[in-house]
């Protein structure tokens, strides 16, 4: 059973606007969450993370929000740029660091 | 910079062949992972290893085996390749709970 879910397979946004990518999880033992970005024919690259003791983490144009009660996290990209067009994966770890659980990905297209 | 390298970017093999995919990391990470990525299915964990000679099954280990004889190297073996193993294979490494670093991937086609 998928423990990390990304229910939107794709998202299109105009350049300069906000992109919001969503992720839900089911396991309350998850205590560390990450977002990865993946271009075609390349491996995923780390984007931003958040610990369960926080509800927000910001890094430049990227902000991750965590709502533990709803078991939901989101990635905000402001302003969106054409170079942000990629597949974004949400991932979670249960604290052991030995295993990470990935969502199915959301393909973001930023339209110039 | 952390570097994770994979032995091949593209590979074409025939059904029934034994296939070796190799992964090397240069950051002395304890943990190494093999995933496959398929459209609509995301990244699925095949095997991981948290120490030399240690291995743990992931979500989809059937048809695969692994070997970790040295800390920096983690090999994925397809004992008898089948067409349903055509996929993108991604290797990753990590230290503790911190982020994983991924290699560039190997696009394997089994005909």
Image (cartoon, coloured by chain):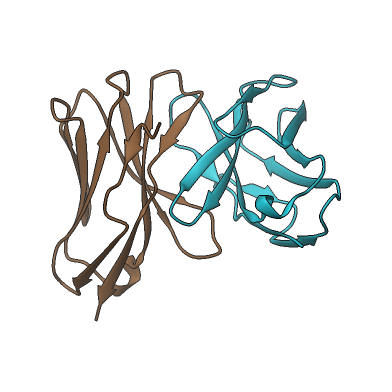
Chain colours: A brown, B cyan
Which residue sits at x=80%, y=45%?
Answer: B20
**Outermost residue, bottom direction?**
A112
Quarter of the image that includes the C terminus of chain A = bottom left
Q: Which of A5 and A95 is in front in this view?
A: A5
Give the x, y percent position of residue A105: 37, 51
Left or right: residue A98 versus residue B54 is: left
Q: How many marks?
A: 0
Which residue sits at x=52%, y=28%?
Answer: B95
Q: Nearer the viewer, residue A100 or A26?
A: A26
Give the x, y percent position of residue A104: 39, 48
Quick check: A59 above or below A65?
below
Q: In which quarter of the image is residue A49?
A: top left
Left or right: residue B36 versus residue A13 is: right
**Outermost residue, right direction?**
B17
Give the x, y percent position of residue B10: 71, 63
The answer to whether residue A111 is visible is yes
Quarter of the image that includes the N terminus of chain A = top left
Q: Which of B108 and B90 is in front in this view?
A: B108
Q: Which of B74 and A72 is in front in this view?
A: A72
Quick check: A64 above or below A12?
above
Q: In which quarter of the image is residue A91?
A: top left
The answer to whether residue B29 is visible is no
Q: Quadrant of residue A34?
A: top left
Give the x, y percent position of residue A2: 38, 35
Which residue sits at x=71%, y=28%?
Answer: B71
Which residue sits at x=59%, y=34%?
Answer: B60
Quick check: B28 above or below A48?
above
């Amino acid at each position: 059973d998928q423990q990390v879910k990304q229910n939107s397979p794709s998202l299109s946004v105009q350049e300069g606007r906000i992109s919001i990518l969503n992720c839900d999880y089911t396991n309350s033992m998850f205590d560390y969450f990450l977002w990865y970005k993946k271009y075609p024919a390349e491996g995923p690259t780390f984007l931003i993370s958040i610990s369960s003791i926080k509800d927000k983490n910001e890094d430049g144009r990227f902000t991750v929000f965590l709502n533990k009660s709803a078991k939901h996290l989101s990635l905000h990209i402001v302003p969106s740029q054409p170079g942000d067009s990629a597949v974004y994966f949400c991932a979670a770890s249960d604290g052991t660091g030995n295993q990470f659980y990935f969502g199915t990905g959301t393909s973001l297209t930023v339209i110039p | 910079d952390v570097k994770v390298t994979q032995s091949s970017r593209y590979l074409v093999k025939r059904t029934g062949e034994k296939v070796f995919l190799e992964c090397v990391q240069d950051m002395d990470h304890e943990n190494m992972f093999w995933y496959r990525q398929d459209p609509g299915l995301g990244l699925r964990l095949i095997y991981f290893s948290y120490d030399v000679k240690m291995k743990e099954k992931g979500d989809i280990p059937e048809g695969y085996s692994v070997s970790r004889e040295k800390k920096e190297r983690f090999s994925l073996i397809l004992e008898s390749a089948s067409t349903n193993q055509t996929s993108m294979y991604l290797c990753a490494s990590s230290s503790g709970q911190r982020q994983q670093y991924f290699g560039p991937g190997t696009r394997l086609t089994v005909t």
